[in-house]
Image (tube, rainbow, N blue to C red):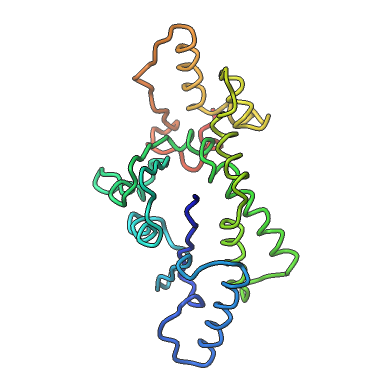
Amino acid sequence: MRSKPVMFTHDSKFRVEGLTTRRRVEINANYKCLLDKYQLTPDQVAYIESDRCYVAESPALLREYFTRFPAPQGSVIISDGGKAFYSGGVSVLQSCGVSRNETLPPLVHQYLSPNDNHHHGAAKAKWRSKCASNGWGKDDSIESSLCLLSFLTHVPPEDICGYFTKNMCLDVDNLNAEICTERISDGNFSGILKNRFFKICSTVFKQFEETGEINDCLPVPKAINEIDCTLDGPYWSKF
């Protein structure tokens, strides 16, 4: 079973309450028709009233998500260490009924995560192609948004299994550093091999292969100016 994605939006075209004008009623009727067209359910869209453009991730959104789609019993979620997943040092996911929450550094998570490494990218590629072929613009925000949500929702189970198998090397019996590198990079090594965190992890893994010992004191790499942040991916962490 795979949980459905939910779109949180400030776009007032998705408002379903307080429809006091004919235009609002027409927009809402069109919205409902598009939900049917893309085989989506109303609980997959959450309208949040605000004058902002984008909805920022937060613990509140996670809690709202799991009120709509409760976590299956015994579920395990692997996440990065983003602020949305922790509140007061406590896992928000576990407070939402998730049995186990494993946290990975962002530079590792971005390669292992089936969402980050392939699923989201594949859906966005289909969505961009659809937007271009239909000439969708600002006035088509309802259909464009629901189209993307549909691509994220309707994915063959075998594709999802494939993402997990590939990213986590589940089909490899004798795993080594070279196979891991090839899998997560698809042969494009330039960014990965220059990544500070990858270099440290590679050193620790080779030590484990040679001695059977695990270094529990894995240092966290810093940017040159010593800020405690790797910004947004390996590009910003290269030498």
- For the C terminus, the image quarter is top right
Nearest the viewer among 231 and 56 is 56
Res. 188 image quadrant: top right
Instruction: In the rendered view, tell whether residue 108 sits above or below residue 48.
Output: above
Residue 169 spot, x, y in % from top left: 57, 29
Which residue sits furthest top?
211
- 172 sits left or right of 76 in the view: right
Residue 126 spot, x, y in % from top left: 68, 56
Residue 41 spot, x, y in % from top left: 51, 68
Res. 127 image quadrant: bottom right
Q: How many marks?
A: 0
- 224 sits left or right of 116 in the view: left
Which residue sits furthest right?
133
Nearest the viewer among 170 and 237 is 170
Q: Residue at x 42, y 73 (%)?
A: 51
Instruction: In the rendered view, tell whether residue 138 sits above or below residue 20.
Output: above
Q: Residue at x 34, y 40 (%)?
A: 100
Residue 178 spot, x, y in % from top left: 61, 20
Q: Residue at x 49, y 50 (%)?
A: 1
Which residue sits furthest left?
88
Q: Residue at x 57, y 17 (%)?
A: 174
